[in-house]
Image (cartoon, helix red, strand yellow):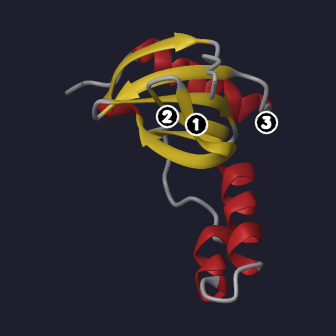
Amino acid sequence: MSKPDELLVDVAAKVESEQSNQMSLTVVTGGAVITGRLAPEAVWRQRVSEVLTDSPRLSEFSDVFTAAPRREGPPTHLHFHVARILQGPVGIPETGGMYRVSIKDVTGWTVGDFSYSDH
């Protein structure tokens, strides 16, 4: 999208203001379907930092994610946790991942997450 969907920006702003991670959302971006729950950016950054800290090879990058966001105004990105990229009948990764998606790149979305089956 050349101009971000105002309703989607409002949903992201509500997640940020309420500091809630219960909003399930599915988006289409760059041809991929991502489904999961939105998290406030600070919560998302903290979780990514924790994962990196526990990694012997990537721990040096963890401090990049602990810095506070440097922007003002409405949210520009969606921060997914416990999220999956849907590919056919399978969700990748199986355990859920952490994804950051630019709101302006979302071409379609719906409230709720899609279930999938690996059978």
Q: Residue visible at 54% across and 19% down?
A: 10
Q: How far apart are marks 2 and 3 (CA)?
A: 15 Å
Q: Depth check: 111 or 18 in front?
A: 111
Query: Residue 107, position in %: x, y?
Result: 31, 21
Q: In which quarter of the image is the N terminus?
A: top left
Residue type, mark 3 in image: Gln
Residue 74: which disc? 2
Q: Residue visible at 61% across and 49% down?
A: 98
Q: Distance between the residues labelled 1 and 2?
A: 25 Å
Residue 84: which disc? 1
Q: Depth check: 61 or 20 in front?
A: 61
Check disc 2: other Cα within 10 Å, few if <14, some if 14-19, many if 20+. Answer: few
Q: In the visual, does 17 lie left or right of 65? A: right
Q: In the visual, does 97 lie left or right of 5? A: right
Nearer to us of marks 1 and 2 is: 1
Counting residues from the start of the chain, the first of labels 3 and 1 encountered is: 3
Residue type, mark 2 in image: Pro
Q: Mark 3 points at which residue?
A: 19
Query: Residue 116, position in %: x, y?
Result: 61, 21
- Report helix, strand or loop for mark 2: loop
Nearer to us of marks 2 and 3 is: 3
